[in-house]
Image (cartoon, rainbow, N blue to C red):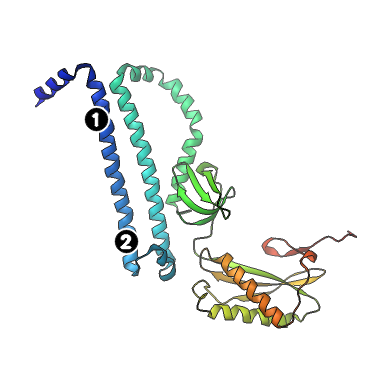
Amino acid sequence: MQEFFDNVIAALGPFWPLVQVILIIVGAWVAHWLLQQLIKRFVRQIVEGVKRKRGVDDTQMLAIRSPLESVRTVQRTRTIGQVLSNILTVVIVIIVVLWCIGVISPSFLQSLTVLSAAIGAGLGFGAQKIVGDVLNGMFMVIEDQIGVGDDVDMEYAIGTVEAVGIRVTQVRDVYGQLWYVRNGEIQRVGNYSQGWNRAIIDLPVPYSEDRERVQRVIEQVGSDMYEDIDWMMKLLEKPSVWGLQTLSADAVIMRLAVKTSPGERWSVERELRARIQDALKAENIALPPMNLVRFDGPNGIEPRPTEED
């Protein structure tokens, strides 16, 4: 057998390095394909196992019929699979490139080792941010800070995570713009898709209105919405009035709050506002003009300055 290979190499002559390069590339492509299939199979088995355990056929149904842990398991598994695929591709490409260079010009690699100290120092300094991006991205996935499909606030971008790479995370915002955020630049992550959210409605009530009457009206609105079959899966508890939140020169602020399913905060807030408006109209309760009241974050409001100020 060895003699046969020696004869083949001798027959190919100067073309043997080229044949070696082709064999290396083909072998690497086959190895990459096989390993990618193993990763996909690993992810698919976990996802199918979760769906089978919860008795659903569609992954989207997990958010409706399954506990939050099941949804997070699927999201996290897919994210880890995506990261492993990216790492596998990068590693195989680097190995193939170095191997091919060694076949074509072994002296080049030998000379490279002589300059390895200088080149290594230069590359190390330039690659610090890249290494930081890779490590930070891996830790974010391992610690389950983010996952594909999560609604997140990364300070630089707010939206839905579409992909988590080894260096860059892709986030699609509410306007459809796709943001590429370097993992190393992510200092904090606010995840709206883990556990639960809270919808908050701050309602300015004029001094002329009976505050207790207004409170009864909005409490009834929250109770009706909680019992609505179309919304009961999105509300984790009955909406409650937290009472008087803030005083201003023109109105008092009452706050209605409710725990919601992950990612449902904004839709619940919009529906609550619409129902409160209809209920207040039915009770002939007027609200103050918005130019008299300025909302200032989650803790309350500040009165707008007047011309005299």
Identify which residue is drawn at 30% across, 22% down: 102
- Measured along the vertical axis of the image, is residue 266 above or below residue 79? below
- Measured along the vertical axis of the image, is residue 80 above or below residue 287? above
Q: Quadrant of residue 51?
A: bottom left
> In the orientation shown, which residue stands out farthest toward the right?
308
Identify which residue is drawn at 47% across, 29% down: 124
In the image, residue 2 lies at what x, y percent?
11, 24
Distance of label 2 from label 1 (alpha carbons): 37 Å
Horizontal placement of 123 versus 306: left or right?
A: left
- Measured along the vertical axis of the image, is residue 144 above or below residue 294? above
Marker disc for residue 69: none
Horizontal placement of 193 versus 241: left or right?
A: left
What is the crowding at mark 1: few (fewer than 14 residues within 10 Å), some, or many (at least 20)? few
Quadrant into which the C terminus falls: bottom right
Quadrant into which the N terminus falls: top left
Q: Which residue matches tag 1?
A: 23
In the image, residue 215 lies at what x, y percent?
69, 80
In the image, residue 257 lies at what x, y percent?
62, 71
In the image, residue 4 lies at what x, y percent?
10, 24
Marker disc for residue 48: 2
Identify which residue is drawn at 67% across, 63% down: 298
Q: Secondary structure at mark 1?
A: helix
- Measured along the vertical axis of the image, is residue 52 above or below residue 23? below
Horizontal placement of 142 versus 259: left or right?
A: left
